[in-house]
């Protein structure tokens, strides 16, 4: 159709699909970044929790070692049994050092820290042998009741050389074993191992936090970008709806209220609608002008007569739209007149005119162009509607073939031709050829010109 060639513009359907696609992609991206942000935040929380627990383990290990050192030194200096009991309570019951390692077992990402604290525990256990030996020396030097001492002290056997020492020498040896340089060096080794573990924890968590913070920053930046894009899409949607839909509607309402043709603006759909409306507007204007000038109707049937049909043909030549022409003959109408008279013949013609007028659209033109000859001009119709036309003709023939209202049975022969460019010079000729073909085939039917 000509108006399809002229109706160019952006389709609302296309814009809608594009916006939906972009929105879906943006929402998926936003959802992905939200998940990433949640994961990065969770990583940050986990790394912080791990740091707290690892630091707690280091403090517990250091605390356990310091308790042992403090209690053994107090026992060596004072000889009070309660310090020995406190020493072995820490070593056998409280077990801060062992619990520290159990805490670290669940953090596989900090195996290096575990190794440092495990080494510290190993050195601390080695130091315990020295400390318990010193407590045995102290017990003998101060002549304490062995039965009142913890079992682990009683089980210690002094070297022959140390056993031969005097009480004062044993006491001095015990003091040297827990206060001397060798003890301090071993103690410092434990402290160093714990310190290395703490430093490793700090560096590890610092790196993990920096990575998590970087990931959080990137995810937040991407989220801002997605939100900005959605905001821009909403603004774009507002302008698209305004320019392609709202404004054309306002203009069309004004045009219709002023009874004039529509302006060709807006989206493809609105332009197509305006072109179609304008074609109908022009067609109606032409029809109204013709009727006002001639008012030529057939006296017998009340439909357009031959003169009106000829004027309509001329008017439709300038309209570049597809249309169809139906030329219709009442079969054997002369025999109806001869048998039943002209009055019945006129009634038959009126019945045919009424059936044709009722069967076709209000935008179509039904005319009587001869004695028993009729024509129908269908606008905006292509050869794709053959079945529709065929059904209409068949319906009319079925009704007329029943001979109702006291009228004799009659039938119609119909020839149909199509044109894609208005009422061209060959349309009538082609429809007449199709009509001739129907008559050659026995009448009462419909044929289409190829």
Image: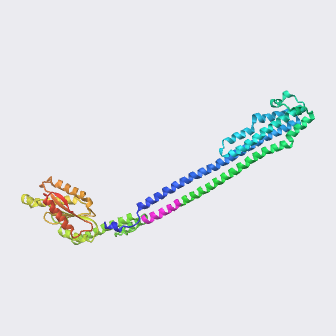
Residue 347 visible, this angle:
no
Q: Residue at x 72, y 38 (%)?
A: 99
Q: Is residue 236 covered in magenta?
A: yes
Q: Residue furthest front?
A: 161
Residue in the picture at 41% in, 60% down? 13
Q: Quadrant of the N terminus?
A: bottom left
Is 338 or 167 nearer to us in this picture? 167
Using the image as rendered, state which of residue 130 and residue 244 is in the foreground: 130
Question: x, y (%) of residue 325?
Answer: 22, 64
Answer above or below: position of 79 versus 37: above
The residue closer to the viewer here, 381 or 409, is 381
Q: Quadrant of the C terminus?
A: bottom left
Describe residue 418's horizontal placement relative to residue 123 as left or right. Answer: left
**In the image: residue 219, left or right of residue 59:** left
Residue 228 seen: yes
Horizontal and vertical percent position of residue 244:
42, 65
Q: Quadrant of residue 355?
A: bottom left
Please report the bounds of the magenta region as a residue range.
229-244
Residue 382, image x, y percentages: 27, 62
Residue 104 on the magenta span:
no
Which corner quadrant of the image does residue 378 belong to?
bottom left
Q: Quadrant of residue 340?
A: bottom left
Main SS of residues in magenta: helix
């Amino acid at each position: 159709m000509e108006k399809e060639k002229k109706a160019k513009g952006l389709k609302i359907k296309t814009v809608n699909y594009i916006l939906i696609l972009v929105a879906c992609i943006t929402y998926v991206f936003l959802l992905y970044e939200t998940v990433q942000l949640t994961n990065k935040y969770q990583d940050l929380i986990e790394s912080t929790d791990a740091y707290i627990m690892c630091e707690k383990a280091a403090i517990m290990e250091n605390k356990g070692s310091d308790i042992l050192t403090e209690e053994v030194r107090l026992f060596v200096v004072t000889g009070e049994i309660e310090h020995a009991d406190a020493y072995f309570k820490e070593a056998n019951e409280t077990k801060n050092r062992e619990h520290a390692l159990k805490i670290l077992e669940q953090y596989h990402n900090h195996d290096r820290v575990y190794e440092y604290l495990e080494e510290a525990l190993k050195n601390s256990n080695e130091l315990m042998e020295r400390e318990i030996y010193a407590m045995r020396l102290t017990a003998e030097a101060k002549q304490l009741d062995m039965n009142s001492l913890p079992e682990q002290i009683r089980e210690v056997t002094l070297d022959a050389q140390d056993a031969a020492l005097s009480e004062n020498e044993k006491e001095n040896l015990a003091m040297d074993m827990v206060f001397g340089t060798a003890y301090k060096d071993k103690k410092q080794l434990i402290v160093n191992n714990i310190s290395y573990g703490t430093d490793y924890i700090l560096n590890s968590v610092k790196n993990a936090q920096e990575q998590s913070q970087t990931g959080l920053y990137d995810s937040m930046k991407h989220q801002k970008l997605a939100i900005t894009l959605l905001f821009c899409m909403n603004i774009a949607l507002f302008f698209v709806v305004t320019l392609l839909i709202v404004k054309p509607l306002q203009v069309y309402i004004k045009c219709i209220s002023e009874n004039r043709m529509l302006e060709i603006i807006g989206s493809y759909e609105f332009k197509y609608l305006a072109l179609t409306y304008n074609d109908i507007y022009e067609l109606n204007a032409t029809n109204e002008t013709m009727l006002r000038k001639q008012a030529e109707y057939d006296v017998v049937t009340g439909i357009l007569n031959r003169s009106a049909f000829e004027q309509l043909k001329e008017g439709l030549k300038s309209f570049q739209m597809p249309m169809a022409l139906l030329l219709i003959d009442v079969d054997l109408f002369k025999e109806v007149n001869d048998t039943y008279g002209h009055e019945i013949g006129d009634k038959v013609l009126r019945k045919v005119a009424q059936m044709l007028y009722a069967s076709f659209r209000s935008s179509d033109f039904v005319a009587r162009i001869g004695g028993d000859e009729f024509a129908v001009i269908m606008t905006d119709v292509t050869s794709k509607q053959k079945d529709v036309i065929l059904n209409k003709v068949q319906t009319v023939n079925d009704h007329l073939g029943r001979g109702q209202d006291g009228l004799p049975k009659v039938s119609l022969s119909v020839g149909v031709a199509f044109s894609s460019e208005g009422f061209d010079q060959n349309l009538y000729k082609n429809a007449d050829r199709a009509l001739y073909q129907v008559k050659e085939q026995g009448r009462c039917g419909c044929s289409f010109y190829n």
